[in-house]
Image: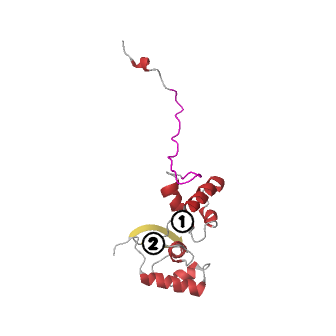
Amino acid sequence: MCYEMDSSSQTLGTTIKKQRRPAQMWTAEEDDQLLQGVKMYGINHWKDVSSMVLGRTRKQCRERYFNHLDTGIKKKAFWSIEEDRIIVKLQKEIGNRWTEISKYLPGRAPNSVKNRYFSALFKNQTTMNGNDKHKVEEPKSVFKPVDRHLYDVM
């Protein structure tokens, strides 16, 4: 397998080359290893957990667990109108603080909430009155329209 060079770092006068592995799908075996690591070390010790899953970083393990494997996460469930309303309301109030917003949506991961907002709600926000959808209003131009007669050449 071919690896590309990502960066290098200096450690006590020696250069260590870091290699970046091409993105690969998680296997069922890796998921099992990750769950076993979380069972052994808990969700606050990702260095130890990642040692159970060869070839995966702490960050990859943490994101995989919280976004896909955590038992509290809803799998492939439809989003309700009420959930959409909560997301829109809280995003307007506190901004893009997805972890905070997800606390009001049991079973929804912060990443899922963010994806829902940007894929469906940001472009086509649901109104607070029901199922009606409307486009977000286009920004107004700062330029004033010019009279058409100014374009006429004599």
- Relative image position of residue 97 (x, y in whole percent): 62, 60
Considering every residue shown, the one lying at the far right of the view is 93
Q: Secondary structure at mark 1?
A: helix
Left of 53 or right of it: where is 86?
Answer: right
- Relative image position of residue 100 (x, y in whole percent): 64, 64
**Image quadrant containing the N terminus:** bottom left
Considering every residue shown, the one lying at the far left of the view is 1
- Relative image position of residue 111 (x, y in whole percent): 54, 65
Badge count = 2
Nearest to the observer: residue 136 or residue 36:
136
**Image quadrant containing the C terminus:** top left
Report how far apart the C-alphas of labels 2 and 1 lie in the structure.
Answer: 31 Å
Say above or below: 100 vs 126.
below
Residue 134 forms part of the magenta stretch: yes
Q: Nearer the viewer, mark 2 or mark 1?
A: 1
Left of 117 or right of it: where is 154?
Answer: left
Q: Secondary structure at mark 2?
A: strand
Nearest to the observer: residue 4 or residue 92:
92
- Residue for point 46% across, 20% down: 147
Residues shaded magenta: 126-144
Q: Residues within 10 Å of mark 1 (few under 14, many from 20)?
A: some
Per the image, the residue denoted by label 2 is: 17
Amino acid type at mark 2: Lys
Amino acid type at mark 1: Asn
- Residue for point 58% across, 62% down: 83
| Quadrant in which residue 24 is drawn | bottom left
Q: Which mark is residue 47?
A: none
- Residue for point 56% across, 53% down: 130
Per the image, the residue denoted by label 1 is: 111
